[in-house]
Amino acid sequence: MMENLYKIEVKVKTEYIEYQSDPNRERYVFSYTVKIKNLGKIPAKLISRKWIITDANGKIEEVEGLGVIGEQPRLLTNESFEYTSGTILRTPVGSMHGNYRMIADNGYEFKAEIPIFSLNKPKILN
C-alpha cells in the first residue's frame, strides 16, 4: 500500500567529457543526467542527496548535500525533474549509486534509491 503512495523512479544517462579529461594526469571527467519522476500518489520534495562514487582502484568517495544543483524540487504525481551534474575520477572506469531523501506533502520521509550506473571512457572496455 505505502509503495503506491511513495514511489520515485530514477534514471541516469552518462557521458565521458573528453575535452575536460587528461588521462596523463589521471583525470577522467564524466557528466550524468538524472531524471527523477514521482510515480507515487502524493507530491514529494527532494531534500538531500547521497552519492557513493567508486573508481576502478576501489577508491570510494561519499558525497552528501542538500538538494541537487542548488534546488530542492517538489514533484507532483507523474511530474519529472531532470538535471545534469558531473564527477571526476582518477580511472577511466567507475560507478556511482546512492539515494535522495524525500519528504512527502503529508510529512512522511523516505529514500528514493539511485540504482548503480557505470562511468566508462568509450572504447576502454572492449
Image (tube, helix red, strand yellow):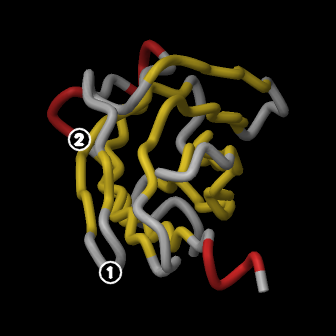
Furthest toward the top, the residue is 25
Furthest toward the right, the residue is 58
Question: Distance from label 1 to label 2 (Cα)?
Answer: 35 Å
Residue 86 spot, x, y in % from top left = 34, 34
Q: Nearer the viewer, mark 1 or mark 2?
A: 1
Q: Describe the element under mark 1 as helix, strand or loop.
A: loop
Q: Name which residue lies at 31% across and 44% down.
A: 31
Between discs 1 and 2, the one toward the N terminus? 2
Q: Is residue 68 above or below residue 81?
A: above
Report the label total.
Answer: 2
Residue 85 spot, x, y in % from top left = 30, 37
Residue 78 spot, x, y in % from top left = 32, 80
Residue behind mark 2? 18
Q: Identify the image quadrant of the C terminus.
A: bottom right
Q: Describe the element under mark 2 as helix, strand or loop.
A: helix
Q: Identify the image quadrant of the N terminus.
A: bottom right
Residue 75 spot, x, y in % from top left = 32, 59
Q: 63 or 123, which lies in front?
A: 63
Q: Does residue 79 appear to the left or right of 25 in the view shown?
A: left
Residue 111 has which mark? Answer: none
Q: 54 or 68, which lies in front?
A: 68
Instruction: Identify which amino acid the numbered label 2 is placed on.
Output: Glu
Mark 1 residue crowding within 10 angstroms, few (<14) / some (14–19) / many (20+): some
Furthest toward the front, the residue is 106
Residue behind mark 1? 78
Instruction: Identify which amino acid the numbered label 1 is placed on.
Output: Asn
Q: Name which residue lies at 38% across and 71% down.
A: 37
Q: Name which residue lies at 60% across and 43% down.
A: 107
Q: Quadrant of residue 123?
A: bottom left
Mark 2 residue crowding within 10 angstroms, few (<14) / some (14–19) / many (20+): some
Q: Name which residue lies at 70% across and 22% down.
A: 62
